[in-house]
Amino acid sequence: MNTEHCIVQDGGEVYIDCKQLPTCPSNSKRSSVSIVGDKIYMNGYEYKNGEWKRTLPALFYNLF
């Protein structure tokens, strides 16, 4: 079974397998996106189980 996904970042928008992710709930005008393996971090939020969640690793990637 192949579990790889195509993750694309275009400006402040992120797509997984050609489907745009929902808007990140952060109020920041600046967009800080980090893609590490199959995890996506944006402005201190992590995309998990179909929604954006505030997590400690996401805050770490936002700061550094």
Image (cartoon, rainbow, N blue to C red):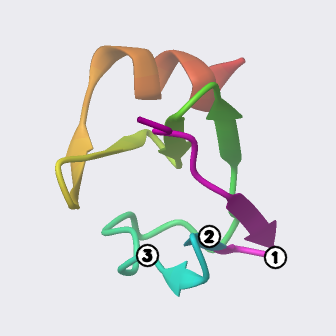
Check disc 3 and give the amino acid type.
Leu
In the image, residue 44 lies at what x, y percent?
Answer: 44, 39
Q: Which mark is residue 10?
A: 1
What is the span of residues highlighted in magenta in the rendered image? 1-13
Secondary element at tag 3: loop
Is residue 11 located in the magenta-colored stretch of the structure? yes
Secondary element at tag 1: strand
Q: State if disc 1 and disc 2 touch (CB < 8 Å).
A: yes
In the image, residue 10 lies at what x, y percent?
Answer: 81, 76
Which of the image's four quarters has the C terminus?
Answer: top right
Using the image, determine if residue 28 lies above or below residue 10: above
Is residue 3 located in the magenta-colored stretch of the structure? yes
Q: What is the distance, in whole Å, between disc 2 and disc 3 at their CAs? A: 6 Å
Residue at point 70%, 74% (across, down): 12
Q: Nearer the viewer, residue 16 or 21?
A: 16
In the image, residue 22 lies at what x, y percent?
Answer: 35, 80
- Helix, strand or loop: magenta stretch: loop
- In the rendered view, does 24 fall on the left or right side of 35? left
Which corner quadrant of the image does residue 26 belong to? bottom left
**Between disc 3 and disc 1, whose residue precedes?**
1
Q: Which residue is mark 2?
A: 14
Q: What is the distance, in whole Å, between disc 3 and disc 1 at their CAs? A: 12 Å
Q: Which mark is residue 21?
A: 3
Residue at point 57%, 51% (across, down): 5
Q: What is the distance, in whole Å, between disc 2 and disc 1 at their CAs? A: 6 Å
Q: Which mark is residue 40?
A: none
Residue at point 60%, 73% (across, down): 15
Residue at point 41%, 16% (across, down): 57
Q: State if disc 3 and disc 2 touch (CB < 8 Å).
A: yes
Q: Residues within 10 Å of mark 3 (few under 14, many from 20)?
A: some
Check disc 1 and give the amino acid type.
Asp
Check disc 2 and give the amino acid type.
Val
